[in-house]
Image (tube, rainbow, N blue to C red):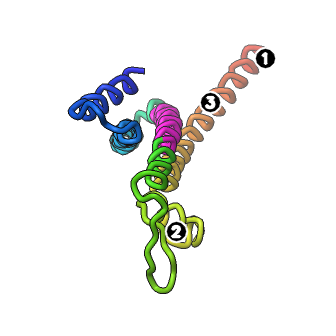
Amino acid sequence: MYATRRIADSARKKTEQPKHQEPWKIRHDYAWNWFAHHANQRVNMFNFFCVAAGVFITAYHNFSENSKEQIAPWFGVLGFCVAFCFMFLDFRNARLVEISESVLKDIENKKIFSGKTFTKGGQRIKFGLLRRDHDRREKIGLLKGRIKHALLIPVIELCIALYFLVFIGQICKLLWGFIVYLFALVEIYIQG
């Protein structure tokens, strides 16, 4: 709610100079500010994720090397939870960026470039940054050109979450040892 109000205030300040500004320009400024805010937020969240993952991995390895093997796997549990939280935040930010991209693409098509095209290599190409990127991705497919960071960020987060899952496996090993120990105590108590 606060971010939306801040974006709207920013768009309003930028558009208040001329009193008779066209509505499509106001919509463009609002959509652009929305896009810039959430795209920046997405990159910042990934940076924080990388730092947090590094902290949990370092803590795990430091505790496992210092003969505190009972504490070390719990950093894997925390890291796994943090990785999934960051993945869900990234999905949210990606959707918010896509919303503004669709508005900007519509404004590009209808107002800024008005369906203008140019010829390159005997091919008619539409003007517009988002339109051309969209058309190119549809023509060549998702992975034939380049891998989008929209796909790469969640894949990295998922790989790190799975790496933390290995640490959680050590907790299962510790719990199994504890259960075996309890059964041994129960057996001694019954016999004794």
Q: Nearer the viewer, mark 2 or mark 1?
A: 2
Tell me if mark 1 has few (under 14), some (14-19) or many (20+) residues whose alpha carbon lies within 10 angstroms of its own. few
Q: Indicate which disc, 2 or 1, sits on the residue closer to the N terminus.
A: 2
Asked if labels 3 and 1 touch by Cβ distance under 8 angstroms, the answer is: no
**120 shown above or below 168:** below
**Mark nearer the viewer, 2 or 3:** 2
Of callouts 1 and 3, the N-terminal one: 3
Magenta-colored span: 75-99
| Furthest-left residue in this view | 17
Disc 2 marks which residue? 136
Pinpoint residue 88: horizontal percent, then vertical percent: 53, 36
What is the secondary structure assignment of the residue under circle 2? helix
Residue 175, disc: 3
The residue under the point 55% across, 47% down is: 162
Few, some or many residues within 10 Å of mark 2 (<14, 14–19, 20+): some
**Which residue is drawn at the image coordinates 41% and 41% (left, top)?**
24
Q: Any magenta on residue 98?
A: yes
Q: Secondary structure at mark 1?
A: helix
- Nearer-the-camera pick, 96 or 52: 96
Distance from disc 2 to disc 3, alpha carbons, whole Å, reads 53 Å
Marks 1/3: CA–CA distance: 24 Å
Element on which disc 3 rests = helix
Q: State which quadrant residue 137 falls in.
A: bottom right
Query: Which residue corresponds to mark 1?
Result: 191
Q: Amino acid at mark 2?
A: Arg
Q: Quadrant of residue 144?
A: bottom right
**What's the amino acid at mark 1?**
Gln
**Mark 3 belongs to which amino acid?**
Leu
